[in-house]
Image (spheres, rainbow, N blue to C red):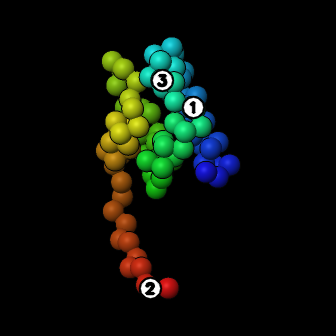
Amino acid sequence: MTTEALTSIQWLFGKLGAAYGAAWERSLGTTPIKDVQAEWNKRLMGFTAGDIRYALDHLPSSKPPNVFEFRDLCRASPKKQVPLLEQTPA
């Protein structure tokens, strides 16, 4: 994991911690935090800052989201349709 990615995930975890308090800490369980952060980084790769902010603005109030629930919130972010370029073989 790159330093930039780790910093982004740490920032995100700080936001989720502020939103959910002790419930966020409990939701992380006993898995080493670096492993949890690496999994979140893997699952959220490719989302824009706008997608992440959208997800943060639409957090459920009942419980902290797991990585899959948060990913689904990011996917729900309204996006401008931008055509993708075709990949050419290397």
Between 31 and 74, the one lying in front of the other is: 31
Residue 1, visible in the rendered structure: yes
Residue occupied by mark 2: 89
Image check: 8 left or right of 85? right
Residue occupied by mark 1: 32
Q: Nearer the viewer, mark 3 or mark 2?
A: 3
- Most distant residue in the top direction: 22
SS for tag 1?
loop
**In x, y percent, where is residue 87?**
42, 79
Disc ID at residue 17: none
In the rendered view, would you say 40 is above or below 18? below
Cα separation, mark 2 vs mark 1, equals 39 Å
Image check: 3 left or right of 83? right
**In x, y percent, where is residue 55?**
40, 37
- Most distant residue in the bottom direction: 89
Cα separation, mark 3 vs mark 2, equals 43 Å
Question: Callout 3 environment at 10 Å: few (<14), some (14 to 19), or many (20+)?
Answer: few
- Amino acid type indicated by mark 2: Pro
In the rendered view, would you say 24 is above or below 77? above
Between 22 and 83, the one lying in front of the other is: 22
Indicate which disc, 2 or 1, sits on the residue closer to the N terminus. 1
In the rendered view, would you say 45 is above or below 28? below
Q: Residue shown at 59%/37% (left/top)?
A: 34
- The answer to whether the residues at label 2 and label 1 have Cβ atoms under 8 Å apart is no
- The answer to whether the residues at label 3 and label 1 have Cβ atoms under 8 Å apart is no
In the rendered view, would you say 79 is above or below 17? below
Question: Callout 1 environment at 10 Å: few (<14), some (14 to 19), or many (20+)?
Answer: few
How many marks on residues? 3
**In x, y percent, where is residue 45?**
48, 52
Q: Nearer the viewer, mark 2 or mark 1?
A: 1
Image check: 57 left or right of 18? left
Residue 55, visible in the rendered structure: no
